[in-house]
Image: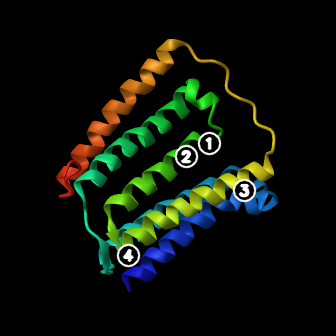
């Protein structure tokens, strides 16, 4: 049952995020009123994914290895940095068209490396696949991309500071939930 709930959450997440791209006229017709149902759908999908993941009990294909934990931690630091540069519009955001979706891909890959059970492969692999599809759909719909203007050095510094603070919070939450981030 857990796998079905997890798959339902992934499907709802994917459809809610792709709705704007796959049915632009319908989404435009909804106007500002369309934000609430899509937000509810996205929040509901997260709830379904968490519940499904916790309920699922799949086979373990590989165990946690110290080297993979270190690689995971570096990838997670980079994923959080990608989110930060997106908001700060720093130099890296001028080179990567979709820094947030790239961050999701890096985050998903990092979690696949250290979680070798079937439910993790389904959850993180599903979100990785969604991010890849999302980039393809966006790029096809909007072929032209205008790079952000160069940002001042304070934006670069703020991206690094935000990354370190958020990384610390993520590690603390993982430990609080019983998932030691460093082994």
Query: Please, what secondary structure does the residue beneath circle 2 have?
Result: helix
Q: In this view, does 42 lie to the left or right of 177?
A: right
* Position in image of residue 129 (x %, y %): 57, 63
Mark 4 and mark 1: span between their CA atoms?
28 Å
> Along the polypeptide, which appears first: circle 2 or circle 4?
2
Mark 3 and mark 2: span between their CA atoms?
14 Å
Determine crowd level at label 1: few under 14, some 14-19, many 20+ residues with C-alpha closer than 10 A: some
Task: From the image, tell me which residue sits under label 1.
Answer: 98
Mark 1 and mark 3: span between their CA atoms?
12 Å
Determine crowd level at label 2: few under 14, some 14-19, many 20+ residues with C-alpha closer than 10 A: some
Task: From the image, tell me which residue sits under label 3.
Answer: 137
Task: From the image, tell me which residue sits under label 2.
Answer: 102
- Image-quadrant location for residue 148: top right
Determine crowd level at label 4: few under 14, some 14-19, many 20+ residues with C-alpha closer than 10 A: some
* Position in image of residue 82 (x %, y %): 49, 37
Mark 1 and mark 3 residues within 8 Å of each other at the beta carbon: no
Mark 1 and mark 2 residues within 8 Å of each other at the beta carbon: yes
Query: Please, what secondary structure does the residue beneath circle 1 have?
Result: loop
Tell me what residue is drawn at x 38 percent, y 68 percent.
120
Mark 4 and mark 1 residues within 8 Å of each other at the beta carbon: no
Tell me what residue is drawn at x 81 percent, y 39 percent.
144
Task: From the image, tell me which residue sits under label 4.
Answer: 118
């Amino acid at each position: 049952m857990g796998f079905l709930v997890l798959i339902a959450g992934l499907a709802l997440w994917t459809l809610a995020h792709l709705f704007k791209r796959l049915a632009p006229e319908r989404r435009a017709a909804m106007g500002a009123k369309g934000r609430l149902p899509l937000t509810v759908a996205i929040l509901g999908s997260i709830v379904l994914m968490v519940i499904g993941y916790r309920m699922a009990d799949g086979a373990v294909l590989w165990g946690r290895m110290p080297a993979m934990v270190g690689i995971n931690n570096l990838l997670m630091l980079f994923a959080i940095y990608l989110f930060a540069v997106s908001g700060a519009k720093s130099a890296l955001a001028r080179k990567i068209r979709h820094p947030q979706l790239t961050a999701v891909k890096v985050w998903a890959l990092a979690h696949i490396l250290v979680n070798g059970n079937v439910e993790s492969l389904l959850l993180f692999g599903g979100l990785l696949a969604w991010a890849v599809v999302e980039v393809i759909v966006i790029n096809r719909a909007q072929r032209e991309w205008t790079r952000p203007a160069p940002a001042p050095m304070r934006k670069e510094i703020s991206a690094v500071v935000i990354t370190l603070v958020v990384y610390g919070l993520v590690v603390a939450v993982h430990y609080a939930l019983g998932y030691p981030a460093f082994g």
